[in-house]
Image (cartoon, rainbow, N blue to C red):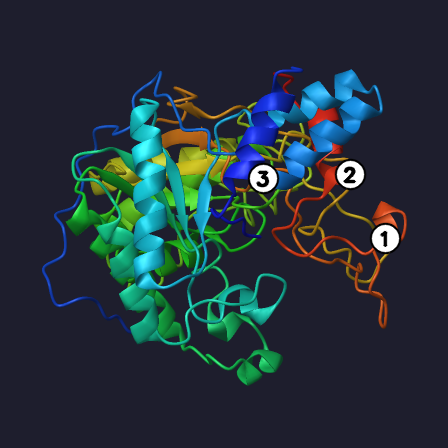
Amino acid sequence: MFSTTRHGRAALVATTATLALGPFALAGPAAAAPAPPTDAPALTAGTRFFTPLPDPGAAQQVIDLGRQHRSTDAALIAEEVATPQAVWFTDGTPREVQRDVRRTVLEAKAAKAVPTLVVYNAPGRDCAQYSAGGAASQADYEAWADGFARGLVTDTQVVVIIEPDGLSNLPSDCGAAYTSDPQNPTDAERIAEIRYAGEAIERANPKALVYLDSGHSGWHSVADSTARLDAAGVSEFAGFSLNVSNYQWTANLSQYGTWVAECLALHPDAETTTPSDCGDQYYSGGPANGFVGGALDAARQWSDSAPDAAANTAGINSRYAAELTAAGVTPTAHFVLDTSRNGRGPWSSAAYADDQDWCNPPGRGLGPQPQARPNAAFPQLDAYLWIKTPGQSDGQCNRGIAGSGTDPEWGGIVDPAAGAWFPEQALQLAQLAAPRG
């Protein structure tokens, strides 16, 4: 899942040359929590987002393609890495992460751009699987989060994504095998860590826009995501993020994020009482369709006007409209979407017992370019962002084939480790981008 911020200056020189070709227990820090944000959009249309140094593997791929006289493909990779995207912070000591954050923020400030920073160091992250790692303990994590916060520059706008999948894959979601993880975190510790990191960041820089990650539209129900976000104190922050390192349709995510924001407004007590009456993707009934509904199909793009009932959201949206009016409340939580690789939507295959649809799926494309305030139809949607670094592997997938270490969907190769550059996938994502450019 993750990428790293430690790119050598040699890679910059090489790339510069080649680009010329083209309900839970809670805990928190002792200090008072920040005041809840206002409902005014913090990111404005036209916001310029930061483009970090490219992965060294991308620079090498551009060089290799150029030597093969494949100038069109070289230009596609060059354009891919020249698009604004996030910088991930995944390890190191408190002093090291402070230094790396400060360097990134100052580079972005010099470029007059807003950086997207990803906090990804929770103990036992990723259910101790492909992107396993993280701090050794809650105390170590909090010290590291404090270091991250010290690296920020006061009164400089930044976007910060907190712990991709951290709330959606709580320790209790990880299964029995996870109990052998050396960090052995609890749900309460994970939630406390996420809240601690967000609050430390907002204390250090009140202009930081903090989004707690909340999975995606093909995963938890709206009520479940609402309860987890509320337990982590989402009302203190700008909102939540969706689809990090995944492939769900932008249209579906926009609907889902809106429903989560509306469910949060209807159920401010979700931290202690998980709501049971929030419309979601698993039951599409509502006033608009006479409360006759079923589960929505994640493979299709959802909308109120879709002719297929398995993609039509009119019932759900009419239900929320009636409930919000009756309760006299409006949503205040905002959200951002990772559109880095979702141009072709999700992938699945019946050829495998476990197709690992989240892991280097074939035939995918880059999604919509980063943009603030991208769709007036979804006022709670703050931005499309490229959070996952496109071109970096999700892990060494085997499609659930027992005893196999290779990926049949990529010609039987051993996929690169999570976070390593995957040239074949990087090029395919660029070739199949939708929309183009």
**Could you classify mark 1 by the number of other residues whose Cα lies within 10 Å: few (under 14), some (14-19), or many (20 or more)?**
some
| Position of residue 170 in the picture relative to residue 131 (left or right) | left
Q: Mark 2 = which residue?
A: 424
Amino acid bearing label 1: Ile
Amino acid bearing label 2: Glu
Specify which label sits upstream in the sequence, 1 or 2.
1
Q: Residue 174 occupies which quadrant of the picture?
A: bottom right
Whether the residues at callouts 1 and 2 have beta carbons within 8 Å, the answer is yes
* SS at badge 2: helix
* Residue in the image at 73% along x and 23% along y: 74
Outermost left residue: 32
Amino acid bearing label 3: Asp
Relative to 219, is 310 above or below? above
Gap between marks 3 and 2, in whole Å? 15 Å
Q: Position of residue 157 (x, y in %)?
A: 25, 33
Q: Mark 3 = which residue?
A: 55
